[in-house]
Image: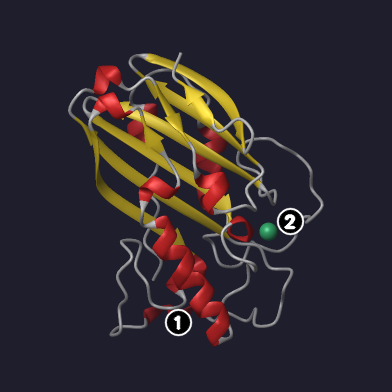
Amino acid sequence: MIARVKPLAWAISLGAGLALSTVATSHDHGHSHDDDHGHEHDDDQRQLGAHVHGVATMTIAQDGGDFVVELNTPSINVVSFEHLPNTDAQRSELEQALTLLQDASNLVELTRAGACELEDIHVTSEQLAAMGYSSSGTKDDHGHDHDDHAHDDHGHDERHSDFVVEYTFHCDEPSRVIGAHLPVFEAFPSFETIDVQWIVNSQQGAARATAGSNAVLFR
Ligand SMILES: [Zn+2]
């Protein structure tokens, strides 16, 4: 069973008024197993929450000494297919992607002076869940309850799916965290743009990161 994605209540509860509703909507996307059809591959909308290949969204939210970074991306930015894995090669590709994602430094680096340490990580993916991985990245070889879901999408390459990756950092000097560097563009070259919304040090903002402009300043 796919672990439920945590709602963004923690971010909304900051009361910063950031328009997170579209981001929250994206959390449903790809996790309800039967609504993935009908998304246009050539949809070039860049609105937050849309499933657009090459495009991802990220929220960075401070809560005291904790910084929660959530990346929501089409699977195609992480692996070469979005359907459930059918072959050993596809399963291997997914496991390699998971290994990369589990090293947060491949995706996001907060200002070093903040003395931030990764505390927690969750990777939510239908594709990994189909292989028995929980969102904490551990493989469950026992109760394969996902078999109950009646996936009938084998061989349907038009299927879309998403990855949601959530990192929680604890920073000893949170007030010194003034930005983030996003090496994700190097680790996963299929990422083209990442729309970032941040709520840090009682301020909020948004920025678009690209391979050529992969740093976000919280100001
Ligand atoms: Zn897709």
Q: Is residue 55 visible in this depiction of the protein?
A: yes
The type of residue carrying mark 1 is: Asp
Q: Nearer the viewer, residue 1 or 128?
A: 128
Q: Ligand 1 appears in which quadrant? A: bottom right
Residue at image point 29% right, 70% down = 138
Q: Nearer the viewer, residue 58 or 12?
A: 58
Q: Is residue 155 above or below residue 128?
A: below
Residue hosting label 2: 39
Q: Is residue 169 left or right of residue 152?
A: left
The type of residue carrying mark 2 is: His
Q: Nearer the viewer, residue 175 or 145?
A: 175
Q: Which disc is residue 96 wearing?
A: none
Q: Is residue 187 left or right of residue 11?
A: right
Give whichever of discs 2 and 1 has the lower sequence position.
Answer: 2
How is the model colour-coded?
Answer: secondary structure
Q: Is residue 122 left or right of residue 115?
A: right
Residue hosting label 1: 148
Q: Is residue 49 above or below residue 32?
A: above
Residue 184 position, x and y percent, is 51, 46
Distance from label 2 to label 1 (Cα)?
25 Å
| Count of numbered badges drawn on the protein | 2
Q: Is mark 2 within 8 Å of ligand 1?
A: yes
